[in-house]
Image (spheres, helix red, strand yellow):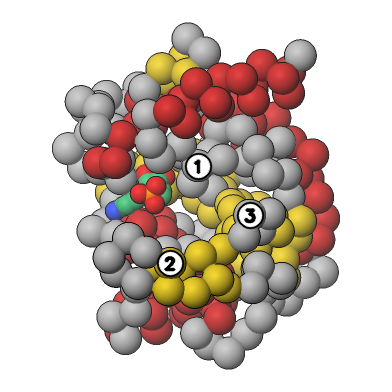
Amino acid sequence: ERLWLVVPAAGRGRRMGAERPKQYLELAGRPLMVHTLARLHAAFPGARLVLCLDSADSDFDSAWVPFADWRRVDGGTQRADSVANALAAIGAEARQDDLVLVHDVARPCVSVADLHRLHACLVDEPVGGLLAAPVADTMKRDDGTGRVAATESRSGLWHALTPQGFRYGLLRRALAAACERDMAVTDEASAIEALGLSPRLVCGRRDNLKITHPEDLALAERILAAQWG
Ligand code: C5P
């Protein structure tokens, strides 16, 4: 069975407020993207990689890619468009039932153990699934003026992490359908859910954080140091 890795890295990362897109910011002395690709390669050295990059990206260096089989595709307007472009680009090679793992470039702390566990859970899973972590904090909904409108039950709530893994044919159909309906798709699983299917939740480590705000970089450095430590 063949494994494809799709890494959307075409976002501008505006919430970081930095000059460069966040995937190129330094993390423990190397660009963030290098860490993410190294983790994926450590777990799946023989996988085929599709990297989604902005067509105007001038920071990327192909020497950072440790995979023997990889290609670059242009990103789209939204994350889901970037992933759809990646799937279209491998249409001639991918089989309908090939497993595709989609992983945010902005999650460099994903552990090799979690990657292997997710993969093992998905091998015999026709719908697919995602790494996820149970919500630990009490959840509040605001009233739009900065005050609490309600406390939501956190029981049964999960943070959706990545990777998220689905069969090539199913994921391509799901993203095309979501696009047609103009659905706001912030992860692959939601597009699959819109088809009436229930992706599997695979409990992952809570330190698989998505670098979003400037303070996340220092936290990620500490997480990486502790994991290797
Ligand atoms: O902005 P956010 O952190 O939600 O983006 C998640 C991931 O999707 C990032 O890895 C980002 O680079 C990627 N992305 C993309 N194409 C876009 C928007 C985001 O590949 N148009």
At a point 25% along the width and 41% down the height, the residue shown is 14
| Badge 3 density bin: few <14, some 14–19, many ≥20, Cα 10 Å | few
Quadrant showing the N terminus: bottom right
Quadrant showing the C terminus: top right
Residue indicated by mark 2 = 148
- In the image, residue 81 sits, relative to residue 184, either above or below, namely above
| Badge 1 density bin: few <14, some 14–19, many ≥20, Cα 10 Å | some
Q: What whole-number distance in Å separates the C-alpha atoms at marks 1 and 2?
A: 26 Å
Q: Which mark is residue 138?
A: none
Instruction: Looking at the image, tell me whether mark 3 or mark 2 is earlier in sequence order.
Output: 3
In the rendered image, residue 139, in percent from the top left (x then y), is placed at 56, 63
Extreme-left residue of the structure: 56
SS class of the residue under badge 3? loop
Is residue 111 or residue 72 the one in the foreground? 111
Residue indicated by mark 3 = 137
Amino acid at pointer 2: Val
At a point 35% along the width and 72% down the height, the residue shown is 143
- In the image, residue 74 sits, relative to residue 79, either above or below, namely above
SS class of the residue under badge 1? loop
In the rendered image, residue 81, in percent from the top left (x then y), is placed at 32, 63
